[in-house]
Image (tube, grey):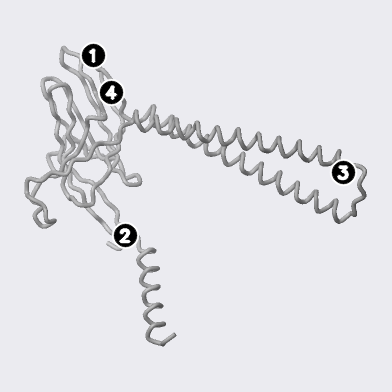
Amino acid sequence: MKPKKIIFIAAFTAAVLISSCAPRPVYKVEPDEKIARIYNGRKILGEEIDSIKAMINFERTDGGSFVFYIYFYNGSEEKIRVEPADIYSENYGDYSYLGKKKDETLLINVIDPEKHLDQIDKQINSAEANLAAAHTTSCIFSGADLLSDIVSAGERKTMDEIEEREREREERRINEKLEQERYRDEIEALNAGKSYWMNETLRLTVLRPGEETGGIIYLPFNAKTDRFRIIIPLSDKNFRFKFLQIKKDFQD
């Protein structure tokens, strides 16, 4: 291989390794309108329409989503339906520098907690089925070992052969035990996630007059925007809250 080609390959490989190890940018969210209040370090936005109050604050980033907490109080004389799946975000401002028209909007729905819980249930069922299959396989091999011992009872085996067979069986039993523990750990983690999504996230709710509710929502972030508003439809009303999406690198 020619020296120039070797140098090129080495340089290309180094560039790939450096880019793969580079820290991912961190996104933070700041309100882009008047703050209703600051509580426990959280900048809270609020709006009231026809005696219905909505408040929202940014909590954190989690994976590929922004996490917000939303609170509602129904001060009206009618029931209102809180439907998390209807909440969405849209960009605002001039995005011509991104090659988009000024009025072109990018709509992103929050993660539907009910659908997410259905997915978790499917994963739990799959993990439980795998655990049952692993247990059945272990029982089959145990039975096969017993049958093998009965069939070969009259055969003469050297000590090395006996020890080798026992080593193989012990290794298999250890692997079977580890596999079953892995499935149990997976089921435990999935159940913990299910409990979180059932109890901490904003769920489908009908608020009677004087009732309140609140919970977490997950909004997938869009790297192609730096301003967005969260729109919360309630009955025939739309609550809107503006935010800035700020990209911050670790080296900043």
Q: Residue beneath label 3, please?
A: 152
Give the foreground label among 1 and 3: 3
* Labels 3 & 2 near each other (Cβ < 8 A): no
Residue type pointed to by label 2: Phe
Q: Quadrant of residue 206?
A: top left
Dot placed on the residue nearer the N-terminal end, 4 or 2: 4
Residue type pointed to by label 3: Ser
Q: Residue beneath label 4, please?
A: 213
Task: Report x, y in % for residue 199.
Answer: 38, 27
Residue type pointed to by label 4: Thr
Dot placed on the residue nearer the N-terminal end, 1 or 4: 1
**Which mark is on residue 208?**
1
* Labels 1 & 4 near each other (Cβ < 8 A): no
Question: Which residue is nearer to you in this view: 150 or 125?
Answer: 150
On the picture, is 153 further left or further right than 53? Answer: right
On the picture, is 158 further left or further right than 75? Answer: right
